[in-house]
Structures are given as C-alpha cells and as structure tokens.
Image (tube, rainbow, N blue to C red):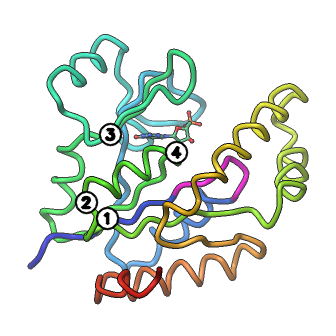
Amino acid sequence: MGLGKLIVFSAPSGSGKTSIVHYLLDQLDLEMEFSVSAASRKKRGTEQDGVDYYFISKETFKKHIENNDFAEWEEVYKDNFYGTLKKEIKRIREQGKNVVFDIDVVGGINIKKLYPDDTLAIFVKPPSVAELEKRLRNRKTDSEEKIQERLAKATEELSYQDQFDVILVNDELSIAQQKAYDLIKQFISNSDILKNTK
Ligand code: 5GP
C-alpha cells in the first residue's frame, strides 16, 4: 500500500469550497480523510475539538512553531493562528488514505510547494466578484463592513489562482462537485496527469 495523495482546496470565502469538500468526503471510493488543522481561536457553536480543529492556546501554537511541527501555518486573522501539523498529514497518509485540506490560499500554495508531485491543488472560484458579493449578502451573517472586508480579501486571493494546478469555477454547485470528483479520481489513479494540465 502506497502513501496517500494530498488534495488541497483553497478559495475566497463564499466560493462554496466547504460544500464541495463535504460532498467529496462522502464519496467513500475516494478514500479521503480531512486534515484537521490546529487553531488558536475559540471554539464556535457545535464545533468539536479534534474534529473541526485541534483547538490550542496561542502559547502552545508558538511552541509548535519553535519545534518546527507545522507543514505550514499562518496568522489568517489578527491574533488567530491556523496551521497544518506535519504529524496530521503523516497519520492520514500512512493509512494509505488521501488527505483533503480546506485551508486559505497562501497555505494551499505552501502545501503544494512542500509536496509538489503528490499534491493536487484546486482553487475554487466564484463565477464573478459580483456573484460572490450576492452570495455573501444572501448568507445574511455578515455586517456591511465585514462584507466589504471579505470582498477586498477575495480580490487579493483571486490574484493567486494561477499558482494552483486547477481552477474550478463554482457556478452550479452540483456540477462543480462532480468535476472535483472526476479530477481527484483521475489524480489518485495517476498523478502524472498534472504534467498535462499546464
Ligand atoms: P475559520 O476560523 O472560519 O474556521 O477559518 C478561517 C480561515 O482559516 C479559512 O479561510 C480557513 O480555510 C483557514 N484555515 C483553516 N485551517 C488552516 C490551516 O491549517 N492553514 C491555513 N493556512 N489556513 C487555514
């Protein structure tokens, strides 16, 4: 049994990335397991430690940085640190399973740089910034200020899209889910397809 592959999903917030990742985790033939990140923020709502994140203090997070325990880490929001522990990737791959990441754009590029041949990096893109704005408004979870903040961040994140192996436009969710499934299926059976995508 070989080591599993790495599948990265990164996207501006509101692109529908999480719905795609959940769909894929339900497709058992893909043999994927979610990479649980470490985070220094507080647990929200129904989130569970060890399932959604490994919730740790900022001090513990800094110790992990000093010990070089992270494959990548970032201060995604002010004073809120997020990172992928090397040991989490190892744990999943050693079972022969494929690792799926739901991480921000810069983190996604860093994973690709660390494991270039074994990673399929997918950038999930909204059809347009106007559509993204519509989705963020429809969610009715954010204030006007937050929406503007997310839109500005999204514009910056879109500038990184060319560093990904694949850009997946999420216009119609079920179609994007199917496309993601096909891409992964092909990649896990033959990662050489990457050589033909660019
Ligand atoms: P939230 O606090 O809403 O769960 O996540 C905030 C952001 O952090 C999201 O964009 C998410 O993709 C990103 N994120 C979660 N885990 C990691 C990680 O391990 N590394 C990086 N670079 N970003 C992460």
For the record, the magenta segment spans 10-15
Q: Is residue 78 magenta?
A: no
**Sooner in the amino-acid sequence: mark 4 or mark 3:** 3
**Amino acid type of the residue that numbered disc 2 sits on in the rendered structure:** Tyr
Residue 189 lies, in percent from the top left, at 29, 89
Answer few, some or many: residues within 10 Å of disc 3's Cα (few below 14, many 20 plus, some between 14 and 19): many
Mark 1–mark 3 contact, CB under 8 Å? no
Camera-near label (1 vs 3) is 3
Asked if the residue at label 3 sits under 8 Å from ligand 1, the reply is: yes
Asked if the residue at label 4 sits under 8 Å from ligand 1, the reply is: yes
Q: Residue at x 50, y 66 (%)?
A: 122
Q: What is the quadrant of residue 190 in the picture?
A: bottom left
Asked if the residue at label 2 sits under 8 Å from ligand 1, the reply is: no
Q: Of helix, strand and loop, which mostly describes the magenta segment?
A: loop
Depth order, front residue of 121/139: 121
The residue under label 2 is: 115
